[in-house]
Image (tube, rainbow, N blue to C red):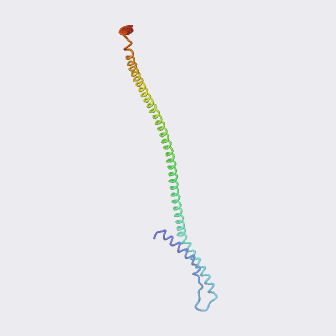
């Protein structure tokens, strides 16, 4: 048996003895005639037995009982210390978890802000790029339109000149003589020389 178990067993035995002690002192019934001294003797012997028992309990039971109570006290104190350690550990883990949660929330907010800023920047870049492309397309379209207009004007001038020449040749064939031809040729030659 372990020391602790023996101490517990002895403590229980001691408590049982103290509780049942009054039931052990029953009046003795004499076989013969009652004597006058017998009740007094029984009373004195009860008290003597009680003091002997109390002395034995105090003498031999005090140390084990005190050890038992100290052991119980030590066990309770140890359990309380362990519970306090567990409580402190749990509180520390809770604080760490709250700290990590706060840090992750801050990181999330920073990342969100950075993503929003990047999105806004990309949006501005896309808008600027679209404006540049639209200006280039407008300039290109203006250039093409201007080219087409110039080409149309040239075509129109050429057609107009051709029409004017054909009208002039029709009308001038009967009006211009050989002499007028030579005069125009000589004017043209003079204008080239000068």
Q: Is residue 139 above or below residue 32?
A: above
Question: How many dots with numbers?
Answer: 0
Look at the image and tell me in which quarter the N terminus lies.
bottom left
Residue appearing at x 37%, y 14% in the figure? 174
User: For the view shown, which residue lies furthest in the bottom direction?
Assistant: 32
Looking at the picture, how far across and down is residue 106, in whole percent?
51, 45
User: For the view shown, which residue lies furthest in the right direction?
Assistant: 36
Which residue is at the front of the view, 193 or 183?
183
Residue 145 position by quadrant: top left
User: For the view shown, which residue lies furthest in the front direction?
Assistant: 174
Which residue is at the front of the view, 99 or 79?
99
Looking at the picture, how far across and down is residue 86, in whole percent?
51, 58
Q: Is residue 79 above or below residue 24?
A: above
Which residue is at the front of the view, 149 or 14?
149
Q: Is residue 54 above or below residue 180?
A: below
Which residue is at the front of the view, 50 or 174?
174
Residue appearing at x 62%, y 85% in the figure? 39
Looking at the picture, how far across and down is residue 5, in whole percent?
48, 70
Looking at the picture, how far across and down is residue 192, in whole percent?
37, 9
Look at the image and tell me in which quarter the C terminus lies.
top left
Is residue 177 left or right of 11 when viewed as pictured? left
């Amino acid at each position: 048996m372990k020391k602790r178990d023996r101490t517990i067993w002895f403590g229980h035995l001691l408590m049982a003895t103290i509780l049942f002690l009054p039931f052990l002192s029953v009046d003795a019934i004499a076989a013969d005639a009652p004597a006058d001294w017998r009740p007094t003797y029984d009373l004195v012997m009860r008290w003597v037995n009680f003091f002997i028992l109390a002395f034995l309990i105090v003498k031999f039971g005090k140390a084990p009982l005190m050890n038992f109570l100290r052991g119980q006290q030590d066990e309770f104190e140890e359990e309380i210390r362990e519970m306090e350690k567990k409580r402190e550990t749990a509180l520390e883990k809770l604080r760490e978890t709250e700290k990590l949660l706060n840090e992750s929330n801050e990181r999330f907010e920073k990342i969100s802000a950075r993503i929003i800023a990047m999105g806004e920047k990309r949006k501005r870049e896309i808008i600027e790029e679209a404006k540049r492309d639209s200006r280039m397309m407008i300039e290109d379209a203006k250039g093409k339109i201007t080219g087409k207009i110039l080409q149309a004007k040239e075509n129109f001038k050429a057609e107009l000149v051709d029409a004017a020449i054909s009208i002039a040749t029709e009308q001038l064939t009967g009006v211009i003589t050989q002499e007028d031809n030579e005069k125009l040729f000589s004017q043209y030659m003079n204008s080239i020389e000068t």
